[in-house]
Amino acid sequence: MARTEKAKAAVEVPRDRYRALRERLQNQRDEILDMYKQDLRAGQESADDGTEDIVDRANNAYNRELMFSLSDNERATLLQIENALRRMDEGTYGRCSNCGQTINLLRLEAVPWARYCIDCQELAEKGLLELEAS
Ligand SMILES: [Zn+2]
């Protein structure tokens, strides 16, 4: 944290890269959601009477059910993506959630939903970080 000029909340990811990353996050989120919708539709077809009712119920239960229907891995990824998109909205994307350092752009290109810099990620993987939820 050497530079202290105007603590602007702006992201330090170049604008074009930022947009590309945002698109990738959104696409990936849509992919996971689409997978889920296909499962849901398949389930509906097997129980094919009273369609509207089933659709209503499906919509109501959508969010709850979504989280249960996804595999742990998909769910974890989806949550991380949602988190990253939220940080983009808040203008904190690209900064480590733990130490506040700018996350290396190459790291973001590899893992667009990364929330920690490489150092803190290591700590997190060793279970030495305690802010998994925020
Ligand atoms: Zn960090």
Image (cartoon, rainbow, N blue to C red):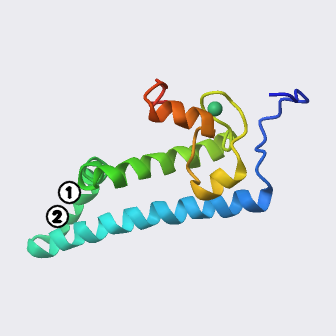
Residue 18 position (above or below residue 126): below
Q: Which residue is mark 1?
A: 57
Q: x, y (%) of residue 81? A: 50, 51
Residue at (64, 45) in percent of width and height: 89
Apparent side of residue 57 relative to residue 84 in the rendered image (left or right): left
Residue at (64, 52) in percent of width and height: 108
Residue at (58, 40) in percent of width and height: 115
The kind of secondary structure element at disc 2 is: helix
Question: Quadrant location of residue 48?
Answer: bottom left
Q: Dot 1, crowdedness within 10 Å: few (<14), some or many (≥20)? A: few
Asked if disc 1 and disc 2 are in contact, CB closer than 8 Å, the reply is yes
Q: Is mark 2 within 8 Å of ligand 1?
A: no
Q: x, y (%) of residue 40? A: 23, 66
Tell me the amino acid under the disc marked 1: Arg
Residue 15 position (above or below residue 79): below
Return the residue nearer the eye: 52 or 89: 89
The quarter of the picture where the N terminus appears is top right
Apparent side of residue 120 relative to residue 39 in the rendered image (left or right): right
Determine which of the numbered discs, if any, sits on residue 82 in the image: none
Return the residue nearer the eye: 96 or 26: 96
Tell me the amino acid under the disc marked 2: Ile
Q: x, y (%) of residue 46? A: 10, 74
| CA distance for labels 1 and 2 | 5 Å
Residue at (68, 38) in percent of width and height: 95
The kind of secondary structure element at disc 1 is: helix
Determine which of the numbered discs, if any, sits on residue 54 in the image: 2
Q: x, y (%) of residue 111? A: 57, 54
Q: Is mark 1 within 8 Å of ligand 1?
A: no
Residue 56 position (above or below residue 101): below
Which quarter of the frame holds ligand 1? Answer: top right
Question: Quadrant location of residue 7?
Answer: top right
Please indicate, yes or no, whether residue 48 appears anywhere in the rendered image.
no
